[in-house]
Structures are given as structure tokens and as C-alpha cells.
């Protein structure tokens, strides 16, 4: 199975053009929408402003995004800058799109599970949570979802991390708790985007600001 993994395009949907051959599956790991930005600092991160802003953007750009997906299905987790429901909008426009949850979904015999929550930064962004909730989400994902492919927005701990802390509890669980994860897809940290490393038998891909092609066995 060939996956095109996209993360942190922040409205720059033309990066989808980097994929020359249609994949079997698109995977988005968050921060797909643009946000109000620093010129609107008094309202950024507020759902009453961000949701209409992102819905308007999709009204103008949605057809271009759908065309670039070329009829292929999408699995996604949202990021901290995503306030509108991308999976719902894509389904409305005829795309087979689904948001992945800790309980997991199957695609062509492969189990995917995950979530979009990130470690708390300052409280103004979507899906910021504190360590106890990250631990609960991570454990539920690895046990109930039991994924082979794990999707999150934030990286696990320090692996391909950077300016913001990664999900430390998730890294601890991947290190010490039994699991089936062989591939972990994420974004969030731009400075280590478009990189891949392997640790503990797990292939970690940070596709922030771009697209990486992954061939599953």
C-alpha cells in the first residue's frame, strides 16, 4: 500500500501537486487549514472566528483540493490550527474521508488509530491538553485502537521534536508498553519536517510542511 503523508500545509494545498502518481491512500496529520494569523492576534485561536475563516477558505479552495486528491481516500487527524471539520467537508464533496480516532479504523487490512491532541502550549489553540490527558489518549490508542499505523499531530517525545515539547507519555508507552505500531506518522514541528528515522523497530515520519511517500509492506 502506498501512502502519501501530508502535514502542516496551513492552507498551502498546492503541495499536494508534489505527488505525481496517485497513492492508494492520503494521510493528513493536521494543520491543514489556514488560521487567522498574527495580524489578527486579538481573535486568533477563537473558534467563533477561526471556524468561519476556515469554512470560507474551503468554500474557495475545496474544489481544488478535491481535484488534487484524484478520487483517492483520506484518513486524517486534525491539528491544533484546525477548527473546521475537514473530513466532513471532504465527504460532502464526494471524497471517502474519515477522521481517525483512538478506537481505530481498518483500511485494506491495515489498522490505523490516533488523535490530534498536543501538549499544552499557551491555551489559545485547539486540542491543547495537559500530560494526564495525553497519557490517557495515548494508552487508549495503543490498547483499544491497537494500530499498526499510528497517526498523531504531535511527535512522540523528543523524536523529530523541536521548538514545542512532544508527547512524552506516548514515547514512554511506545518504549515500554506492548504494541503493534510499525509506522508512526505526525507533523507539528516544522523544523524537523520531511524527515524519517527508525527507533525501536518503529519508522517515524514527520511530514510537516510537505509530503512523504511511504510504502507499507
Image (cartoon, helix red, strand yellow):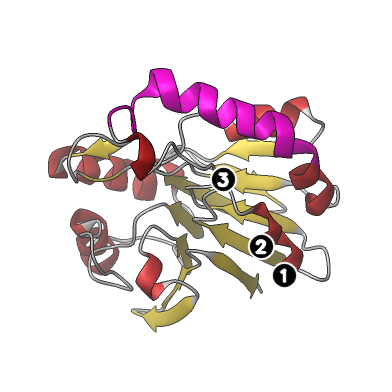
Residue that badge 3 annotates? 76
Q: Is residue 48 magenta?
A: yes
Front-most of residues 106 and 87: 87
Q: Looking at the rendering, which quadrant does residue 180 occupy?
A: bottom left
- 127 lies above or below 19: above
Measured in 3D between alpha carbons, the distance from the residue under mark 2 to the one under mark 1, in whole angstroms, is 6 Å
Query: Which region shows up in magenta?
Result: 42-63
Q: Position of residue 142 (x, y in %)?
A: 36, 50
The 10 Å Cα crowd at callout 3, few under 14, some 14 to 19, many 20 or more, is: many
Residue 104 lies left or right of residue 75; in this view the side is left
Q: Of tags 3 and 2, which is closer to the observer? A: 2
Query: What secondary structure predominates along the stretch shown in magenta?
Result: helix
Which of the two discs, 3 and 2, labels the residue nearer the N terminus? 2
Quarter holding the N terminus is bottom right
Circle 2 sits in a helix, a strand or a loop, which is it?
helix
Q: Which residue sits at x=80%, y=38%?
A: 63
Please give the residue where the numbered disc 1 appears in the rendered image.
Answer: 18
Q: Are marks 2 and 1 in contact (CB under 8 Å)?
A: yes
Q: Secondary structure at mark 3?
A: strand
Task: Please give the name of the residue rendered at 47% of the width and 47% of the height, measured from the top-left corner.
Answer: 31
Q: List x then y, in percent, for residue 16.
A: 70, 60
Residue marked by disc 2 = 15
The reply, left or right, for residue 5 in relation to residue 115 is right
Amino acid at each position: 500500500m502506498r501512502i502519501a503523508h501530508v502535514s502542516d500545509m496551513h492552507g498551502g494545498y498546492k503541495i499536494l501537486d508534489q505527488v505525481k502518481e496517485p497513492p492508494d491512500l492520503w494521510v493528513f496529520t493536521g494543520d491543514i487549514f489556514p488560521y487567522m494569523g498574527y495580524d489578527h492576534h486579538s481573535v486568533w485561536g477563537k473558534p467563533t472566528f477561526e471556524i468561519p475563516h476556515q469554512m470560507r477558505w474551503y468554500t474557495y479552495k475545496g474544489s481544488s483540493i478535491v481535484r488534487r486528491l484524484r478520487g483517492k481516500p483520506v484518513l486524517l487527524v486534525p491539528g491544533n490550527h484546525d477548527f473546521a471539520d475537514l473530513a466532513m467537508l471532504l465527504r460532502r464533496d464526494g471524497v471517502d474521508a474519515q477522521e481517525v480516532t483512538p478506537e481505530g479504523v481498518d483500511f485494506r487490512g491495515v489498522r490505523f488509530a490516533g488523535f490530534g491532541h498536543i501538549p499544552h502550549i499557551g491555551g489559545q489553540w485547539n486540542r491543547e491538553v495537559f500530560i494526564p490527558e495525553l497519557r490517557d489518549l495515548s494508552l487508549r490508542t495503543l490498547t483499544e485502537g491497537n494500530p499498526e499505523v499510528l497517526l498523531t499531530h504531535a511527535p512522540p517525545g523528543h523524536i523529530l521534536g523541536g521548538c514545542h515539547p512532544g508527547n512524552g507519555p506516548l514515547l514512554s508507552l511506545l518504549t515500554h508498553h506492548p504494541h503493534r505500531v510499525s509506522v508512526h506518522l505526525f507533523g507539528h514541528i516544522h523544523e524537523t519536517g520531511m524527515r524519517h528515522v527508525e527507533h525501536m523497530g518503529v519508522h517515524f515520519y514527520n511530514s510537516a510542511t510537505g509530503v512523504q511517500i511511504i510504502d507499507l509492506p
